[in-house]
Image (cartoon, rainbow, N blue to C red):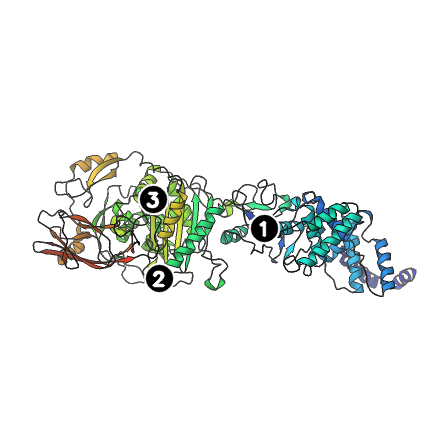
Amino acid sequence: MKLILRSLLKLKHSSKVILAVLLICLVVRLLPYFAPIRAADIAQNQLAMQFSDRNGLPLGTLLTRDQEHTSVVPLNQVSPQFIHAILAAEDASFYHHGALDMKAVIRASKEAIHAKRIVSGASTITMQLARMLDPVPRSFSGKLSEIWLAWRLAAGMNKDEILAAYINRLPMGGNIYGVEAAAQTYFSIPASELNLAQASLLAAIPNNPTYFNPYEHWERLKQRQKYVLNRMVQEKYISGAIATRTHTEKVVFQSRQRGIIAAPHFLFWLANQIPPSKPYKAENQAPLFKGGWGDESVIRTTINRPLQQFVEAQLQQVISSLAANNVHDAAALVIDNHTGEVLAYVGSPDYFNEAKLGRNDGVQALRQPGSTLKPFVYELALEKGLIRPNSILADVPAHYAIPGAKLYSPTDYTERFLGPVRVRIALANSLNVPAIKVLEKVGVETFLERLHQLGFEHLNQTPEHYGLGLTLGSGEVSLWELARAYLTIARQGEAISLVSTFSNSPIPTDAMNRVSTNSPLLNHTIWQLITNILSDSYARATAFGVDSVLNLPFPVAVKTGTSSNFRDTWTVGFTTDYTVATWVGNFNGEPMRQVSGVTGAAPLWNRIMLHLHEHQEPAGFPSPEGLVQLPVCAISGLRPTPDCTSVVQEYFYPEDKSNYEREHQFNLPPEYDEWLAKQQQSNFTSASLRILSPHHGDLFLVYPGEETQQKLEFKLAGNKSAPVEWWLNGEKLDTNSANSLFWNLRPGKWTLEARSEEMIDKVSFQVELANVKPTRRGFSISNN
């Protein structure tokens, strides 16, 4: 040292400065290698996340980003039996020596010299922890590095902190690390509940996790357990008799699992909601539930596991039945209307089938929603007074000039127009032209703003981008967003966020649900009216038949949707208790064959709804507040006259009652001229014969064994005083009813004719035998 100082003094001033700077840099660079290591410096942040359902049933475990199953628990939440076992097996004098056990080093050296080979090691738990933190080659220099790191650990941490860090990093076979992860994986219990037999087996694994793999080398593990128990006897933790009895005790290891029992899409989606700046630390979380599948290391979700597994099974069955129609994928979401809690979340038929794109999440995927947005444009128009509950809308040919595109002429799937229709009929039957005309009144920009208030955050293009097609599904939304919006209808305009976890979760609810809480949505009367329309099975009979899968034996409101080219089918509906949203389609974008909302997504929706209300029917929907019901003619929507064949009740604002009493006829404005001309050309004038039901080209499904129970109504428009004959496939039907009759469905291709004097109307339809019998009576129509 004196020699170095003398040399420094002889240097010039500038050289001294340079050398001093270099020395300071060297000290700064080496300082971390000399500083004590604290417990906080090696805290485990990237941990496996474990999830349970709402009742504590396990859903599964998601590994760390390094695909490790790691859980962390404090030392006082580990069974004393395991603590004693691991100390006896790995470092019996742990609490009585420093970073190194000099007695063990001397003993190991003597044994090695005598046997001319390494007989026993001298690594302490502190040294093993150092090796876990910084794996180094098993060389002389590597051993020195390990010892140095062990000294730094001993300098900065007490014995309990070192032991806790050690047992939470123990390699326990495969990708399992730590005693807590091992206890839950192998025995489905927390580490605090390990008994002596389980504890001694787990303490035997870390010595050589591959060699002592419990699934492949059971006898080897039992021999190592015997060694652990003998060491515990030597350290006076247990008696020899207890050790013998424990070694013979039968211990059952759980079978291998993928780590996920149910709701894989939900778990992965949920895990992605945790901000990177807030890693999940199980040891810092308050208990989420008591008992069951662990305590503090589990995120308790709102999922109901039995319901989740039921929905998963039904989804697979429905997809299997539609395989011939080129249908491969589906998704479903179930919400509790009272709390907004997510009860079931299925993103695809099989998450683990990568060949079929199973990892795609159909709940969060963005797809065109078809007609499912129509209720919201009608609600907004009613709210702004642009239409009335009793308004008559024009379902007639219309043409719109779109900049940069051809003339847009919207039609319905039937390519037929009904002429003047009530608001109720237009929405319930999902008629396209009236919906576009209503959007014209509202304005695309205004409607888009309302959709944003309802939580459709992915509709982020300009109003010009979507145009009038917005109400027909020209944008892209997710099933999650649709379910949340329909939950708003179910709650009579009260928008709330969807809830996926209970309190003390590290997952921020606000980040997942951007629903405006200041939006003017609380016009209960309008939302009640929309619910009333969507729950009116008679109003939608024109498009969906008199008894489709949308009709349930209890009050339910529902809407279907089909995107262009049959790429997506949707069904979203609710009772007073639950909202259910389903999607059926193909992740790769291929169109389905002869599948619409009512034949694709609706059967799945139907099964889920029936299951939810299997033991208790829901309450009825409240009637629209402040409105009055008046009789109207079902076809014209006007005050009934003697020639009206069907009278129904419709809601009116009280102030519209006087106009209703004065109005006896509806003079068609010029916008009906083209439609009237086509009716006359087709011999479909108001004075002629016209079959109202079924429609030309309809396809009905009849279920096996119920052919005699399922009936289709043959119905004429208007009132025919002259005799009417009904002919089916050339055979005259024996009937006393002129304007309407019911016919038992039978498979086949049918041509129906109505004849009266010189007038004839004819339609063709088809009835097919369904593959799967539903859980309730009824048939479905293929279009919507």
Per the image, the residue denoted by label 1 is 49
Question: Would you call the spot at circle 1 few (<14 residues within 10 Å), some (14-19), or many (20 or more)?
Answer: many
**Left or right, residue 51 beside residue 753:** right
Between 29 and 475, the one lying in front of the other is 475
Question: Would you call the spot at circle 2 few (<14 residues within 10 Å), some (14-19), or many (20 or more)?
Answer: some
SS label for mark 1: strand
Between 142 and 675, the one lying in front of the other is 142
Residue 752 x, y percent position in the rendering: 17, 56
Choose the circle earlier in sequence order: 2 or 3: 2
* Label 2, label 3: how far apart the Cα atoms are: 27 Å
* Label 1, label 3: how far apart the Cα atoms are: 38 Å
Residue type at mark 2 is: Asn
Choose the circle earlier in sequence order: 1 or 2: 1
Res. 638 in view? yes
Residue type at mark 1 is: Met
* Label 1, label 2: how far apart the Cα atoms are: 39 Å
**Left or right, residue 637 beside residue 66:** left
Task: Identify the mark at residue 557; answer none if there is no mark.
Answer: 3
Q: Are marks 1 and 3 in contact (CB under 8 Å)?
A: no
Residue type at mark 3 is: Ala
From this view, report whether residue 12 is shown above or below residue 641.
below
From this view, report whether residue 290 is shown above or below residue 698.
above
Q: Report the residue at 9% width, 49% height from top.
A: 723
In the picture, the quarter occupied by the N terminus is bottom right
Per the image, the residue denoted by label 2 is 325
SS label for mark 3: strand
From this view, report whether residue 564 is shown above or below residue 776.
below
> Which one is in front in this view, the residue at disc 2 or the one at disc 3?
2
